[in-house]
């Protein structure tokens, strides 16, 4: 039986990767990596809620593994512009963080929801395949880095998976709001805008 580790944050792409693997009948180990970003506490709350809903449908979904790295701090932070959010070394940090866990579970792959839309230095297939090579060389075990949605638009992912995935439950926000015990999108940050635009493009209601 195939096993996969999926980098899972509860956002559109990571949730769709999770469902893709589950629909293939694989045993899936979701991993949430805490790097010290300010939005992670509330984001994890929403990711847990989504995991609970998904677990009721798929028995092969394993508990969320939380890895706390505290990699980032005030001098090493995300850079938000009007068009993008750049987090230095993001993909390298995530993949190397979960590699040991994936090997301990005898997983065949690590799934990551990168679309490759932004020209970040660690966000291209050559870079990701090199990380895969280094993990394999360093562990002496083949561990694939799978990027199933690379090259796709976010709206395309939303449209393709809307039949199977509770996309309205996904969450991605730089400045989440806690109001009356509920975690809400701020509606203003780049992550919120990207999510809203993707749903609009796919003609799927939020």
Image (tube, rainbow, N blue to C red):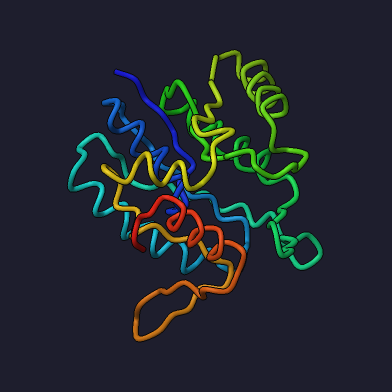
Left or right: where does residue 161 sit relative to residue 157?
left
Q: Split into 4 quadrants, where in the image is the C terminus?
A: bottom left
Depth check: give the residue in front, 32 or 86. Answer: 86
The quarter of the picture where residue 36 lies is bottom right
- Say if 59 sits above or below 182 in the image: above
Question: Which residue sits furthest right?
Answer: 75
Left or right: where does residue 34 sit relative to residue 91?
left
Depth check: give the residue in front, 108 or 203. Answer: 203
Depth check: give the residue in front, 43 or 19. Answer: 19
Question: Which residue sits furthest bottom?
Answer: 180
The quarter of the picture where residue 152 lies is top right
Residue in view at x 31 percent, y 26 percent: 26
- Say if 2 sits above or below 189 in the image: above
Q: Split into 4 quadrants, where in the image is the N terminus?
A: top left
- Say if 146 sits above or below 184 in the image: above
Left or right: where does residue 24 sit relative to residue 120?
left
Residue in view at x 41 percent, y 47 percent: 158
Residue 98 position in % (x across, y down): 54, 37
Residue in view at x 78 percent, y 39 percent: 121
Residue 66 position in % (x across, y down): 46, 50
- Say if 96 sits above or below 182 in the image: above
């Amino acid at each position: 039986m195939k096993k996969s580790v999926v980098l899972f944050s509860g956002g559109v792409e990571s949730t769709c990767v999770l469902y893709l693997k589950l629909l293939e009948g694989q045993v899936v180990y979701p991993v949430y990596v805490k790097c010290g970003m300010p939005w992670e506490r509330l984001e994890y709350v929403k990711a847990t809620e989504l995991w609970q809903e998904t677990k009721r449908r798929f028995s092969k979904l394993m508990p969320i593994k939380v890895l706390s790295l505290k990699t980032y701090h005030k001098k090493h932070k995300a850079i938000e512009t009007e068009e993008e959010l750049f987090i230095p070394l993001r993909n390298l940090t995530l993949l190397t963080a979960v590699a040991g866990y994936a090997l301990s579970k005898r997983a065949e792959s690590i799934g990551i929801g990168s679309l490759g839309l932004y020209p970040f230095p660690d966000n291209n297939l050559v870079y990701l395949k090199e990380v895969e090579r280094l993990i394999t060389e360093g562990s002496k075990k083949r561990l694939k880095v799978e990027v199933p949605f690379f090259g796709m638009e976010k709206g395309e992912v939303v449209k393709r998976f809307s039949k199977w995935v509770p996309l309205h439950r996904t969450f991605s926000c730089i400045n989440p709001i806690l109001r009356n015990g509920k975690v809400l999108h701020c509606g203003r940050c780049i992550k919120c805008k990207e999510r809203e635009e993707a749903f609009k493009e796919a003609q799927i209601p939020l």
